[in-house]
Image (spheres, rainbow, N blue to C red):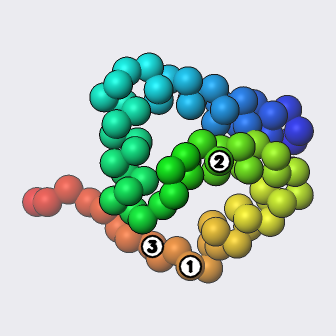
């Protein structure tokens, strides 16, 4: 529902402040962006874009990304 979407968007945007609390965290994000070949500030911009998505767009993404037909079953049992 819309409340859940708003809470998730708030988490994404609020999380950025925690990711910039120390120089080490800022450096780690910068290096991760460089290592992945992403432009500076990519993760901040991704959070901004994601927070602006509507509920329908999010539901379409989830239904494509988590397609139950793409999953397989695995039985896990203790060794005897």
Q: Check the image and report above or below for 29 versus 33.
A: above
Q: Check the image and report above or below for 60 versus 40.
A: below
The residue indicated by pointer 1 is 70
Q: Is residue 4 visible?
A: no
In depth, the one of 30 and 66 nearer the eye is 30
Q: Secondary structure at mark 1?
A: helix
Q: Is residue 40 visible?
A: yes
In depth, the one of 67 and 65 nearer the eye is 65
Query: Which residue sits furthest front?
Result: 40
Quarter of the view holding residue 27: top left
- The residue at 72%/49% (across/down) is 50
The residue indicated by pointer 2 is 45
Query: Which residue sits furthest top?
Result: 21
- The residue at 40%/42% (across/down) is 29
Mark 1: give few (<14), some (14-19) or many (20+) Cα within 10 Å.
few
- Mark 2 or mark 1: name the one nearer the start of the chain: 2
Quadrant assignment for the C terminus: bottom left
Figure label count: 3
Q: Which of the two marks, 2 or 1, is nearer to us in this view?
A: 2
Cβ–Cβ below 8 Å for labels 2 and 1? no
Q: Check the image and report above or below for 68 versus 59.
A: below
- The residue at 26%/60% (across/down) is 77
Q: Secondary structure at mark 2?
A: helix
Is residue 3 toward the left or the right of residue 29 in the image? Answer: right
Query: Which residue sits furthest left?
Result: 80
Numbered mark located on residue 73 in the image: 3
In depth, the one of 54 and 3 nearer the eye is 54
**Image x and y of residue 40, in percent:** 50, 50
**Image x and y of residue 15, in percent:** 57, 29
- The residue at 39%/62% (across/down) is 36
Q: Which of the two marks, 3 or 1, is nearer to us in this view?
A: 1
Quadrant assignment for the N terminus: top right
């Amino acid at each position: 529902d819309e409340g859940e979407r708003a809470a998730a968007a708030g988490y994404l945007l609020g999380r950025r402040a925690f990711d910039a609390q120390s120089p080490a965290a800022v450096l780690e994000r910068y290096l991760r962006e460089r290592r992945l070949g992403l432009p500076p500030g990519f993760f901040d911009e991704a959070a901004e874009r994601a927070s602006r998505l509507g509920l329908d767009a999010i539901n379409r993404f989830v239904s494509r990304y988590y397609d139950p037909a793409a999953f397989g079953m695995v039985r896990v049992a203790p060794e005897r």
